[in-house]
Amino acid sequence: MRWYWTLGLMCMGCASLSRGLDGNPVDTEPVPTVEKVFLVPVDEALFVTRRVLEEQRLDVFEQKASSDLYSASWEIGVNQKGNRTFERYLVRGEAVGPRQSVIRIFRLQYREADQAVEVLAEPGSLGPGLKGYTQFETHNEFSRQTFEGVPEMEGFKLRRGTRDLPQERKVLARLEMVPSLELVGGKASAPVRSVKVAGWEAATPDAAPRCGEPLEGVAPLLGSGQTVLVADPLGTRQLPEAAARMLCDATERKLPVALALSMPAGDQAVLDEYLASPGGDADLERLLVVSDFWRRVDQDGRSSAGMLHLIEAARRLRAQGHAVSLVAFDSSTASGNAREEEMAKHLLAFRQEHPEAWLLVLAGDVHVRTGTVGWDAKFEPLGARLTKALPPASVRALDAGFERGAHYGCRFNVWQQVDCDVHGINPTAEVRQEPDAPRKVALFAAPSETGFHGRLYLGKLSASLPVIQRAASGPEKPLATHGTPQKPATAP
């Protein structure tokens, strides 16, 4: 069976604190207080950093005695010989784990024949006690930089070195604001012998679903015949937890409820079977054995443990007597508009048979838009198709707001290989959520340009790993349309 690769999550734009060297406006992200650790190997992070600087027409060189990178120099202003000032970039990468790295970019300033100026030892001009900026609290505080071994310039003295946050945020954009891939089709590889799902509890006849903390602002969306589309960041704990809460809230209103998941429509029978089962270990094992979706060669976050917990939440609500359905609406082979059409066909067929059901649909950012996409005028997302076929007022789409965190997904790395693993994910300024803010639904006064009617704020994202990890030896790996796939890493 051929593999198809499609985008499941839009690349989020990036910006920085001020204007960069190229004059581009940058983001208004708060001044950092802890070091930012990227969830990529240090060599990959350095490769991306080098590319960012080279795109600004800077030649980049390697230090022979270290792994440091430094750029060609440029003059600040135009001054007479003997009173000139030049600057260049110094890049220092640090590995803090096999797939964790820190990148520090310094702007070094040299002054011609400036013998009296002391070389500053400060790492930057951000203020005393700054720790940098990262989700990990384990990284050491900024150490004082002596800049030993930095490139020299004949006739010039190093005057100071300052941390260049705008450049570092461009690197952040390349590493954590990139599209995720949805892998459609393929062969199963992982045999199911004994499965242990993190946080799984043996079901009992009276087991209640774990609905979690209340979700503010969801009440206007809970109506008979309403279709709510939610953009799924893929491979997180927070999105399935919020979806479970919405299901609980809808059933409390005595609404017939349906949960639509981006699983192949061919899995509908096994989903129905599990939904009607007691939810024992044998029932769980049968779900994972019969459905190839959970045992794909490379998993993209849609078959995470969080999603399995969400399915179990729906089963428990049904076992309590509520009218709950599961809908598998995705394609197993199609891509592009053909996939959007097939997804819409399955959901519309369900809606025709269950006009009164409250329908919650989870899919990637691109799919759930009820408007257009900027890169392809012919592409019609699932959400736009549903809006045309159903009463427009009955369809509402929510994008995701969150704090910087991590998710499990697939993406192309810098060598154009498919990398399925835990990755960092960073929001744009528009969807960024303040630290410790509650999760909630915030509806807009009018739809956005892309057709979102509101935003579901999820808090700080954390990764949810696939239920079944890839076997040590598996079948032939699929070919990607834009590169050769990398052997996926096995997450702990």
Image (cartoon, rainbow, N blue to C red):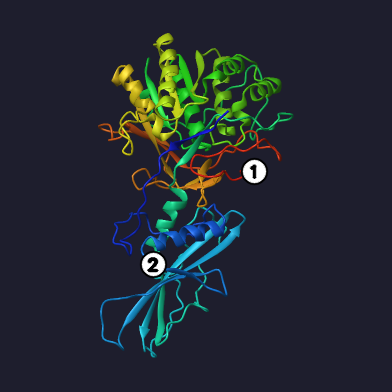
Q: Residue at x 41, y 35 (%)?
A: 365
Q: In the drawing, does residue 472 fall left or right of residue 269?
A: right
Which mark is on residue 58? 2
> Callout 2 environment at 10 Å: few (<14), some (14 to 19), or many (20+)?
some
Q: Is residue 119 above or below residue 167?
A: below
Mark 1 and mark 2: Cα distance apart in space: 37 Å
Residue type (three-letter) at the residue carrying disc 1: Thr
In the current view of this chain or complex, which residue is farthest to the top?
A: 353
Looking at this view, is 112 or 448 the one in front? Answer: 112
Evaluate whether residue 180 shows in this view.
yes
Q: Position of residue 171 (x, y in %)?
A: 44, 57
Dot 2 lies on which element? loop
Closest to the observer: 72 or 85?
Answer: 72
**Disc ID at residue 68:** none
Q: Residue furthest right?
A: 193
Q: Nearer the viewer, residue 443 or 145?
A: 145
Amino acid at the residue labelled 2: Leu
